Amino acid sequence: MKRILTVVLCLGLLLTASLPGLAADFNATGYPIVDETLTLTFVAPKAPLAPNYDEMELIQRLEAETNVQIIWENIPEADYQTAKNLILASGDLPDAFYKADFTDYDLITYGQAGLIIPLEDLIEEYAPNVKALFEQRPELRSMVTAPDGHIYSLPRAEEMGLVSTPFFLSINTTWLERLGLEMPETLEEFANVLRAFRDQDPNGNGIQDEIPFSFMFDWWCADIGDLFAAFGMADNSQHRIVRDGQVIFTAIQPEYREAIEYFHGWYQEGLIDPESFTQTASQYLAKGKMDPERLGAYIWWETEEVVGPERAADYALVGPLEGPHGHRLVGRSNNSEYNRAAFVITAVNKHPEVTMRWIDRLYEPYMSAQVTWGPLGIIYELDENGMLVNLPLPEGVSMGEYRQRVAPTGVGVVLQEHFGTVVDMEPRAKQRLQDIEEVYAPYQEAENYPMIFFSPEELEQINILEQDILDFVNLKRATWIVDGGIEQEWESYLNQLNRMGLQELLEIYQTGLDRFNANQ
Ligand code: CA
């Protein structure tokens, strides 16, 4: 009897020792996470100016708090993707990839091959901060849920709300005053202002050298997609919007056709800078700083960057312009402030529960802000309301550089409601957000196309079809605005797109969107 008991006990010990995640001194709540220091190995890319992460103050504080020591294999950002692929191919895996930046294809193939592990049960048991975020934002959970139903990665988000409307239209108000004109409210009033800029020498040098209106065709923050909205539907560089859960390809809609016919009129009248279709960003930004002033109106995500700090006061934002049929609308871009693959745990990790508790610490809102911008006492202090506010920077350093040195970044979630409560926003970003809320938000399209997790088969189909379709659409879009001809070519254009597989492509996007919505 005694002997049997011993055998059973030994077997029990053996089982305990061989199962991962059962560190004897593991604390399921509170800190430290383990009573005896435990070591884990993480691979992480790092910014050019960043030291190895073990030298970062924030990381050292985490070690002291948790008793978990991370051996950091930091790889320079530029080499990371190649290095990551080599590591995965070699099978010599770290315990986790921090700031993992796995592609969707990586996540699902390495997940299904068992090189990285599903996290949903670990989240449920050991990640109260991540769980709380998923409850607040069910779309964060959808975003990281693979088509096979597993969660292989933790998300990253910085919801500043700054990229939802990238097409800020600025106008020269000094010129408006000089010519006795009002801020335009409709597309037609705007056109009349451009005509006046063209004809009435607002820069006063006696030469007709004014550029009434310039933009950058198909550039993420300088395209005229939001002017299309005056005809009832904004355009964007994917030509893809969502209304009532339905994916709409803008570039085959009657609103789009009417907009192009109309803007061809502007082009013929000389209201549009012909270089709008060819100029580079640096040429465009230089144009705003020429002497004397030559730019009447332009599109860019920040007024000042185009015309420079001294001249910025001469320009003001134009709100959404009302179109010929009474539409006043702003698009909602598909640019994302989210990353799906911030953190993954590999199959060799013997302490996934410790790892999950450690990483979950970084999803606590105050910690997420410090991971993103830098630690308390270095970048931040707490104000009387307990909010993280910026300390003055040391002399001679820029925010961007300093942040690289002190903030590991890449992991954590800062939600929109955390700005102004948990963490203050830098003044520049604050101003832009205020502009968005006041000028654009009331007219903004309700939905956009979210970050969908496609299957490898879907991704392959998208890769085959999409680029040719977009190239064709954009070529016609530019040609029709410059040379006209949309009336004659419209039918053959629609047929050509169908032959190129547009309907199949839209079906994939619709299926993905339906799946995403069903997961929420
Ligand atoms: Ca002039």
Image: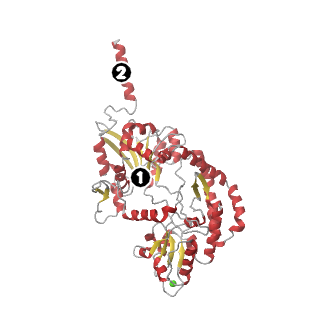
The type of residue carrying mark 2 is Cys
The type of residue carrying mark 1 is Leu
> Quick check: 390 above or below 453?
below
| Residue indicated by mark 1 | 415
> What residue appears at the point 63 percent right and 50 percent down from the top-left corner?
507
Image mark for residue 10: 2
Instruction: Give the quadrant of residue 216.
Output: bottom right
> Disc 1, ligand 1: is the CB inside 8 Å?
no
Q: Residues within 10 Å of mark 2 (few under 14, many from 20)?
A: few
Question: Which residue, as the protein is rendered here, is positioned at the far front?
Answer: 326
> What residue appears at the point 60 percent right and 49 percent down from the top-left corner?
510
Query: What colour scheme governs how the chains and residues are painted in the rendered image of this protein?
Result: secondary structure
The picture places residue 101, in percent across and down from the top left corner, at: 46, 49
Residue 343 visible to the viewer:
no
Question: Which residue, as the protein is rendered here, is positioned at the far bottom?
Answer: 206
The picture places residue 85, in percent across and down from the top left corner, at: 48, 47
The picture places residue 375, in percent across and down from the top left corner, at: 31, 53
> What residue appears at the point 29 percent right and 62 percent down from the top-left corner?
392
Between residue 12 and residue 364, name the one nearer to us: 364
